[in-house]
Amino acid sequence: MKKLFKILAYVALVLVLAIGAHLYYLTTLAAKETYPEDTYLAHVENKNALIIVAHDDDMIGSSGTIATLCKNGWDIREMCFYQNGGLYAKKDSMKNPIRKKDLQRVADIQGLSGVDPVDFTFRNNTRSEESYMPMPYDKFAENFKIDSLTKIIAAYIEKNKPTVIFTLDSEMGGYGHPDHVLVSKIVLEYCQAHKSDSGFSVKKIYQAVFTPTLSERVMRNMPVYAAAKKVYQRDGMPFPDVQFNITANAALKKECMQAYTTEQNSLRQIWPYYHWYPASVYFGIFDRDFFRVIEI
């Protein structure tokens, strides 16, 4: 009996040490920089915002912020796109209905006012096996239906009249996906072009980004991220302007991430081991969302 107790105690000690070591490893990945806490969103009178992204899960890293805003009275809707055709037509036709259900579930968890998925294949070439790989900005016009996509995004903005729009960054698109860059560029360029129009509502664009240490430590081994820095000629994502503490809604953020049932492989690359730990532990380490804020 004593021998069994010693074995169990030894196993328990090893397990505790292993978990402790792994948690320490996660702290080495977390952002080391500190930015000003966002104050604008808490004091806006017209609490109306849009999320405009290429894919349904693109803003998942900011779900803690979005959930907090919804609790504080913000009216937020999301528009994203579903493409179907080319090499992955069969796969997309099977996955897209599941992804749309997951999108609605995430919206319910966060408290969004609604979601507006758009079935529109905005790529001209749907035969690429690596559509997520970056392409030079000057190749966008020949590879994307930019005019049609701009009309859809413009109509959405004008219909909903948001004060704030949330997107990914318009330079790297996060880890480098050209769809991300394109949609964010269109949002930014449209708002800048129409900011002087009578009644134009958008005051700020919040582009979700990682800090330099967070992006380099989490994505340094991702070939797409390394390629993006070369193709887009950037050192990384744009620097954040503000941070937003999300620990109060850590459980909701994890629940949102888990809800995208078909995208777990991708999410776990960007948020390594998030599914291993309670939300309070994991998002006690990765405790902030970061944004580049662009005045319109």
Image (spheres, helix red, strand yellow):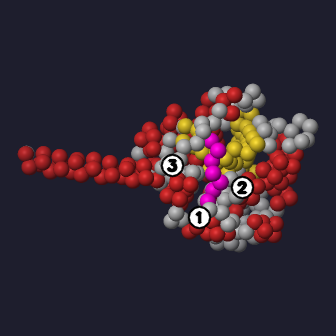
Depth-wise, is mark 1 or mark 3 nearer the camera? 3
Kindly state the secondary structure of the residue where label 2 is placed.
Answer: loop
Question: Which disc is residue 225 wearing?
Answer: 1
Left or right, 26 with respect to 88, comes to: left
Compute the Cα span from label 3 to label 2. 21 Å
Residue 236 visible (yes or no)? yes
x, y (%) of residue 69? 64, 33
Number of other residues with Cα within 10 Å of mark 2, as a class: few under 14, some 14 to 19, many 20 or more: many
- The amino acid marked with disc number 1 is Tyr
For disc 2, the marked residue is 170
- The amino acid marked with disc number 3 is Ala
x, y (%) of residue 288? 54, 42
Residue name at image x 69 percent, y 33 percent: 40
The secondary structure that most of the magenta stretch takes on is: loop
Compute the Cα span from label 1 to label 2. 15 Å
Kindly state the secondary structure of the residue where label 1 is placed.
Answer: helix
Q: Quadrant of residue 114?
A: top right
For disc 3, the marked residue is 31
Residue 100 visible (yes or no)? no
Mark closest to the chain's N terminus, 1 or 2: 2
